[in-house]
Image (cartoon, helix red, strand yellow):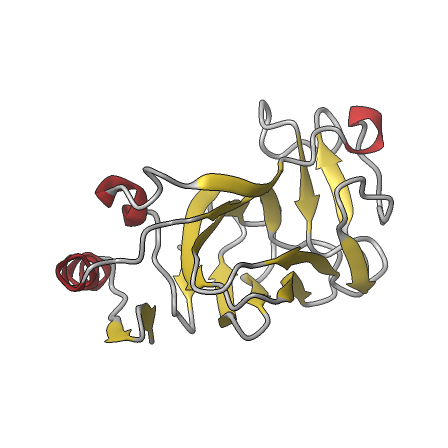
Amino acid sequence: MIRILKLSAIISIVSVIGFTAHASILYFDDFNAEHGGVGALNFTGFSKGWAVTKGSVDLIGNGFHDFFPGNGLFIDLDGSTGQAGTLSKSLSFESGVGYLLSFDIGGNQRWGDPDSVNLSVETLLPTQTIRMNPLDALTHLEFYFTGDGKTHALTFEGLGGDNIGLLLDNVKVESHVPVPEPVTMLLLGAGLIGLGIVGHKRSGRLSA
């Protein structure tokens, strides 16, 4: 069961309402082209600008520790050094422009206690703690925020240190996403309550 412990986000129901109808893709990475398509432990040589700023991450899948067959390569956010990794990518965001961050994330698919990751886009998207049980399926999540004309780091900070962490894939940032109208925000709030997550309208965002 997935839990988002500090939410200022719009989760998958965004796509139902159609926020991305006129959006353009600012950034996308499914990790499939990394390392010649072959998995590697404690991987650091990312070709699309990711930096491992703390601990380690594993590049797995595509037949190598492949917990989600058919999904190509993906990232284990708790690598093989006993210290969970922090994966970071800098992006520039236009002032006043709406952005939608989406990605797929799943449990470690092995054993142990639930795992967590802290997600943030510095001051644009405050830290969200995502917590999942070991056998939770690959789940699509979406988060909305507004740009400020500056460059910020998109960061996934794995928490823990047992060499098995949450599994990350298909990271995408779309720009020029329409700002939700007040009525839409109310509909989203009702939808989030239905998911067991209560949101409050504040400056065009939802927050816990």
| The N terminus, quarter of image | bottom left
From the viewer's side, name the closer residue of 133 and 94.
94
Q: Which residue appears at 56% of the width and 67% of the height?
A: 120
* Picture residue at 67% right of the left edge, 31% below the top: 66
The answer, for residue 130, to whether it is visible in the render is yes
Along the line of sight, the residue nearer the viewer: 23 or 141: 23
Where 180 falls versus 48 (above or below)? below
In screen coordinates, is 119 left or right of 190? right
The location of residue 205, given as percent across then percent down, is 33, 68
Whether residue 170 is visible: no
Task: Establish if 67 lies above or below 17.
Answer: above
Q: Position of residue 167 (x, y in %)?
A: 61, 47
- For the C terminus, the quadrant is bottom left
Position of residue 3 relative to residue 135, above or below, is: below
Q: Please state the horizontal and vertical placement of residue 14, each as a whole percent of the image.
A: 30, 48
Q: Is residue 156 above or below residue 61?
A: below
Q: How many marks?
A: 0
Q: Quadrant of residue 121?
A: bottom right
Query: Residue at left 78%, top 25%?
Result: 37
